[in-house]
Image (cartoon, rainbow, N blue to C red):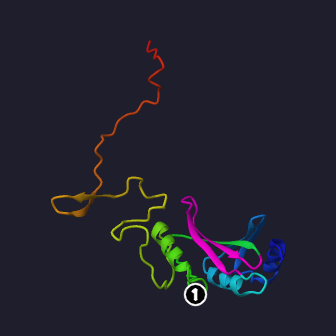
Amino acid sequence: MDNQFIFKYSWETLPKKWVKKIERSEHGNSFDTNTDCPFQLLCFLKLHTYTRVQVLIDICGVDHPSRKRRFEVVYNLLSTRYNSRIRVQTSADEVTRISPVVNPFPSAGRWEREVWDMFGVSSINHPNLRRISTDYGFEGHPLRKDLPLSGYVEVRYDDPEKRVVSEPIEMTQEFRYFDSASPWEQRSDG
């Protein structure tokens, strides 16, 4: 059974309210779903005879600040039985919460925690939603494009206090005007 059959069968079988768009490529099938439907769609893909997705490879996030629903959550799946890769993607904003897929795929707990930690996209009733890659005192979400490159605080080890301290960022270099002209080129001022 090839990708084309799975693509055609999925399009004919899936409820249309679950899927906005399906695309097929040589690397696998891609499903674009509504924010409230990833759980149902992933359960269907895991349990149905002609898809049999056994492995959730990962869940990742993408930040598109110019969009109304700026975050895209992407689930990468693998069907070892049919040698097929499937990508399911959904969109969310800062306040929209997605449904967790920990029940059909237990490994999703770690990936959903990482998407929340890095982007701030939270899951409804997630069993263990807490920071996984950043410090618990970290403010913001590091992979959002609106987070300043320098961050908000700096962390350093204070030898007299014998502990790590967080302080507001203090820029040691004053703002300078940088001329983009090459220093090797001769200037003719007059």
Quarter location, residue 54:
bottom right
19 vs 4, left or right, is left
Viewer-proximal residue among 156 and 96: 156
2 vs 58, left or right, is right
- Residue 186, horizontal then vertical, whole percent: 47, 16
Does 80 appear in magenta?
yes
User: Which SS type dominates the magenta stretch?
Assistant: strand
- Assign a secondary structure to mark 1: loop
- Residue 95, horizontal then vertical, whole percent: 49, 74
Residue 71 seen: no
Viewer-proximal residue among 42 and 67: 42
Residue 82 seen: yes
Viewer-proximal residue among 46 and 172: 46
Does 94 appear in magenta?
no
Quarter location, residue 53:
bottom right
Image quadrant holding the N terminus, namely bottom right
Q: Residue at x 72, y 71 (%)?
A: 85
The region drawn magenta spans 53-82
Depicted 173 relative to depicted 74: above or below: above
Of all residues, the one furthest to the top in this rendering is: 190
Of all residues, the one furthest to the left in this rendering is: 160
Question: What is the tally of numbered marks visible in this picture?
Answer: 1
Q: Residue at x 80, y 74 (%)?
A: 7
Q: Which residue is mark 1?
A: 103
Quarter location, residue 75:
bottom right
Depicted 153 relative to depicted 44: above or below: above
Q: Residue at x 51, y 70 (%)?
A: 115
- Residue 171, horizontal then vertical, whole percent: 30, 47
For badge 1, the amino acid type reads: Asn
- Residue 121, horizontal then vertical, whole percent: 50, 72
Image quadrant holding the C terminus, namely top left
